[in-house]
Amino acid sequence: MVAHVPETLLARVIPMTTALNPSAWYSRLVAYKGARPEYSLILAALVYTYVVAQRSRIESLLGGSWSAITVVPSRRRAFDEQQLAIGIRKLPDSAFHPVERLRFRSNAALPRQTYEPSVFEPVQSFDGERLLLIEDLWVSGATSLSAAGALLAGGASSAVLLPLARMVRDDDLWTPDKYLEEMKVRYDPAHWPR
């Protein structure tokens, strides 16, 4: 469980899909970063389709139209080398092209299931911006929640976090009733299967 996450931030997390581990969808979400970068176009299409379909809900949470879209920073790759950002930038609608707002601080460590916005540093000022933050695969939520918290601490007026997929394990979904029950659970990391 990720501790000490502000409730207002948890209310602004909207997973687009669920990725059962193991499954083909989970495998593609893991593989696109290295071995299969062409999958980033599939992910970009999912982002675009989802955001267009859910635009009014997202804007309601943001308090208006987003100022910018960004992706959760990577510890291993620069922003311009992140496959998710590369794929989304290929969309024809420039309103969806992600911009860099945060990066990991040098030598910063983020222990699993820890909420720590201070591991990120702003790349530029984003005071008053309404930001849409895209994550690929949400496992514990520590990195993406910390990034969203850093955006808010850095002056963003609001942020909505959109993970492409929330990971669940197959042993957590052992009956159809259990699966349906899990799908109804609020998007709160404290209630998610580990």
Image (spheres, rainbow, N blue to C red):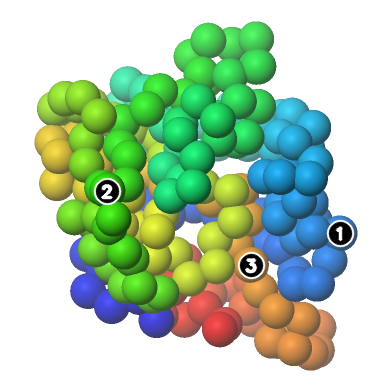
Residue 58 is left or right of residue 174, and the answer is left
* Residue under numbered circle 1: 24
User: Of the residues shown, which amino acid type is indicated by label 3?
Assistant: Met
Among all residues in the image, which is located at the extreme front? Answer: 107
Mark 1 element type: helix
The N terminus lies in which quarter of the figure? bottom left
**Which residue corresponds to the image point at 33% horizontal and 66% vertical from the top-left?**
110
- Name which residue type carries label 1: Ala
Q: CA distance from mark 1 to mark 2?
A: 35 Å
User: As drawn, is 29 to the left or to the right of 62?
Assistant: right
Residues under numbered marks 1 and 2 in contact, where contact means CB atoms less than 8 Å apart: no
Q: Which mark is residue 167?
A: 3
Residue at 16 percent of width and 25 percent of height = 125
Q: In terms of depth relative to the viewer, which is nearer, 99 or 79?
A: 79
Q: Is 84 drawn above or below residue 97 in the view shown?
A: below
| Residue 67 image position (x, y, % from top left) | 32, 21
Q: Which residue, given by chain and number where applicable, does mark 2 sit on? A: 106
Q: Are marks 2 and 3 in contact (CB under 8 Å)?
A: no
The alpha-carbon separation of the residues under discs 2 and 3 comes to 28 Å
Indicate the quadrant containing the C terminus: top left, top right, bottom left or bottom right. bottom right
Query: Would you place residue 29 above or below residue 19 in this image?
Result: above
